[in-house]
Amino acid sequence: MDVYVDDRKSDLLTVERHIPDVGHFKIAVVGRPSHPALIRTELVGADKEGFNEVQAWEEARLVEHLLSVYRLTTDQQIEYLWLGHGRIWLDTEGNQDETKPRFSATISPISDSDYEREMKNARLLFERTIDHQPLFKLLSDSQQPHLPISYRYLSIYKALELEFKVGKKWPTLGELLARFEDEYRALNISNRTLENYIHEVRDLCAHIKLDNSDTGRGITGLESAEYPRVERLFYLLKNIAFQHLTTKFPVTVNHPPDSADVSESRVTAPEVKARLEGQRKLDKAAKLHQTALVWEQEARGKDEAVSKACLEFARQARFLAGLFTVRGVV
């Protein structure tokens, strides 16, 4: 059991936010580098009556956003601690030693040698994205392996909708998706174009009946025939969305390996070896995506011949990434 003592020596990350007519908040992630234990919130200058309704709402909103960016910038699947259907909160006021909160809890540690870089990254992302909370909540949900694949897909789809949909049209989405068409074709999951297929899968995940047959009732669980294709498309679409958004918010986002499905939880030694090999291929694919992004950035502002060559290098890199993605899935 770990005992928490509020001596402020275990703060991993601290951010501050002043909200006019509400107050000045200090929020910290507390624990060890590989073992975040809790989030501490402080309303500077608050009286002993505690938070009023508005302050409590703003506190919850800030904590939710900090959790979102923490999940994106680290590979730790940080989550609330629940008791029944309610979250566990520890309340105190003042600075006297006797009011310092203490609790005991068992939390599984996750090794993270890059925590200093990730904490700096989380602080920067928090500051730059405070006005984009709905978008980052969607991105954060897409990173949660305990959520159904249909919900995670809809989260990424909605994030792209916020970025690209104007009225009933998506005027610039096609330009982004075109760069990934070869990778999509390598998945061999549909004959439709990527731009058309993502909308069709959205209907499946939203349980929208596509036609009058029984096959169009949508994704309802692992037993669904469409599930493997939706899962592969989800990983591709998530990568597309994150690559786009890291050009808009120039901060590194951590992509933790996605957990295996429940149906795949029991594996033999050969299967473990095969999955490790598959993960290595997925890592190579991620590096190729980064290479493609560099070439695409190099193409900007260059003369036509150089720009064309750079874009061709990017296209080839994405095509190779698609091959590794297909072979990397076990």
Image: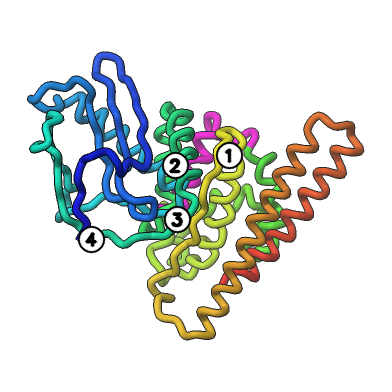
Task: Using the rendered view, name the quadrant where residue 284 is placed.
Answer: bottom right
Q: Which residue is mark 2?
A: 119
CA–CA distance in space, label 4 to label 2? 23 Å
Q: Give the number of the mark in front: 4 or 1.
A: 4
Choose the circle earlier in sequence order: 1 or 2.
2
Magenta run includes residue 51: no
Residue 161 on the magenta span: yes
Q: Which mark is residue 106?
A: 4
Q: Secondary structure at mark 1?
A: helix
Q: Is residue 71 visible?
A: yes
Q: Which residue is mark 3?
A: 112
Question: In the image, which residues are magenta?
Answer: 151-172
Q: Nearer the viewer, mark 1 or mark 2?
A: 2
Q: Are marks 3 and 2 in contact (CB under 8 Å)?
A: no
Horizontally, residue 229 falls left or right of residue 182, namely left
The residue carrying pointer 3 sits among few (fewer than 14), some (14 to 19) or many (20 or more) residues within 10 Å by Cα, namely some
Badge 1 is on which residue?
Answer: 246
Which residue type carries mark 4?
Thr
Distance from the alpha carbon under mark 4 to that under mark 3: 18 Å
Return the disc, 1 or 3, that comes first in the chain's sequence: 3
The span from disc 1 to disc 2 (Cα, nearest Å) is 17 Å
> Neighbour class for label 2 at 10 Å: few (<14), some, many (≥20)?
some
Which of the two discs, 1 and 3, sits closer to the camera?
A: 3
Secondary structure at badge 3 equals loop
Residue 35, compared with residue 123, is above or below; it is: below
Compare residues 68 and 106 and report the one nearer the observer.
106
- Identified at 70% across, 52% down, the residue is 181
- The tag earlier along the polypeptide, 4 or 1, is 4
Q: Quadrant of the N terminus?
A: bottom left
15 up-or-down from 227: above or below: above
Q: Residue at x 38, y 66 (%)?
A: 221
